[in-house]
Image: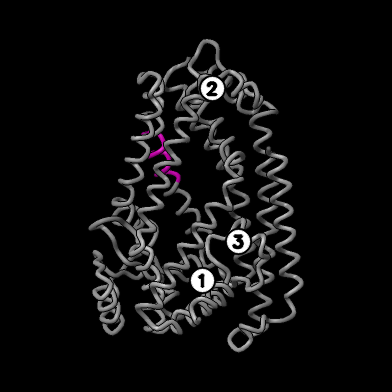
Amino acid sequence: MLLVGVMLKFWLGWRHMRHITWHRAQVPALFTPMIPLPAHQKAADYTIAKVRFGLMELTMGSVVLIGWTLLGGLTILNQFVLSWLEGGMIQQLALLAAYVLINGLIDLPMTLYQTFVIEQRFGFNKITLRLWLMDLLKSTLMGIVFGLLIGALILWLMGTAGGWWWLWAWGVWMSFNLLMLFVYPAFIAPLFNKFVPLEDETLKSSVTALMERCGFAAKGLFVMDGSKRSAHANAYFTGFGAAKRVVFYDTLLSKLSATEVNAVLAHELGHFKHKHIVKRIGSMFIISLLCFALLGWLATQIWFYTGLGVEPNLVAPNDALALALFMLAIPVFSFPFTPLFAYFSREHEFEADAYAVAHTNGQDLATALLKLYEDNASTLTADPIYVKYYYSHPPASERLARIVA
């Protein structure tokens, strides 16, 4: 399964790069009046660089996966931890923590390369090494706190809640995720970025009027200092229920007119109007329930361990080992579902675009999207097969065709 997935991903990546290269020399006719050739070529080069990097990550990730499983890495780590700590909660938490830490250290060079080489080369990186290290420290500390808490609770349930432990564990996991919808905007996000109330009174008035017309209320309108880390622009809603807030990147406000900002905001409102957020949360509930149920069964099957090259414990619980092995295996076996999730995501984007066109000027949305495509160096000539498999957003040509129709 791993080999099939890797070969398919390489084939898709090769197709995508070839298609972009073939069309690099000329801006597509639909975009010729708006997108200059240098910007088109920058987007082509940036996309190809990201795809190549993704294939490099895929190769490294596959090697690491084989190292953890068939080459005995997880077994060696488990035996090492057992030699220091007798089987019990501390030993199991130590195994999970060591596994996550080692994986994080392995990924670190790739993250640095992506930020300080690829993003830097194309003029998108604005973060300093010092700030990057501070972000890493903060995220690591939060990962330790939340990870140990959730990990300990799930391991405790696996050991004490009987055959239906996975149902209780699923409840804990989903409760944590729902809690984060309220906690993240107010307490976690401000640890990384500065959020200030939107001060442009003209824009605030038009945004507020749009939200009132759409029957939408938010806790506040904020501007985030995204330019401190990246030149990419965006806007989003965060939180849930009464904790919802609208966040604009400062880079977005510097690039779009007030009417274009309204159009982008209307698109985001469309996601809420069509209940896309609720649907995604519902999907996450179902998928995570199925995953926990599958883990509950696999954890009791000896072949689950031995078939993936891992020796289960004979005199100590295998709960942490099962969790780590499941986290390694699930991406490999869930890859065939990627195009299905991508399809529904693209349909949601079309619906949100249609909502924005109904409540604002469609031309404003079109020009805003074109500016964002250009400023974010998004390719206009994506390979159609690659799009169907990976793209969560429709390509520019399809979106504009529907918007201006």
Residue under the image location 76 percent in, 65 percent down: 18
**Foreground of the two, 289 or 127:** 289
Q: Give neighbour class at mark 3: few <14, some 14-19, many 20+ (Cα, 10 Å).
A: some
Question: What are the residue bounds of the magenta stretch?
Answer: 140-149
When the figure is inspected, residue 180 is found, relative to residue 253, above or below; the finding is above
When the figure is inspected, residue 179 is found, relative to residue 299, above or below; the finding is below
Percent coordinates x, y for residue 227 in the rendering: 46, 70
Among numbered discs 3 and 2, the one appearing first in the sequence: 2
Q: Which residue is mark 1?
A: 231
Q: Give neighbour class at mark 1: few <14, some 14-19, many 20+ (Cα, 10 Å).
A: many
Instruction: Label 2: state its secondary structure.
Output: helix
Q: Point out the image quarter for the N terminus.
A: top right
Residue under the image location 68 percent in, 33 percent down: 67
Residue found at the far front of this picture: 405
Residue under the image location 37 percent in, 67 percent down: 270
Among numbered discs 2 and 1, the one appearing first in the sequence: 2
Amino acid tagged 1: Ala
Q: Decide: marks 2, 1 in contact (CB < 8 A)?
A: no
Instruction: Label 1: state its secondary structure.
Output: loop
User: Disc 3 to disc 1, how far (Cα)?
Assistant: 13 Å
User: Disc 3 to disc 2, how far (Cα)?
Assistant: 35 Å
Q: Which residue is mark 2?
A: 81
Percent coordinates x, y for residue 122 in the rendering: 62, 70
Amino acid tagged 3: Phe
Residue found at the far bottom of this picture: 33
Does the magenta-highlighted stretch encompass residue 144? Answer: yes
Instruction: Label 3: state its secondary structure.
Output: helix
Q: Which residue is mark 3?
A: 116
When the figure is inspected, residue 64 is found, relative to residue 41, above or below; the finding is above
Principal SS element in the magenta part?
A: helix
**Foreground of the two, 289 or 236:** 289
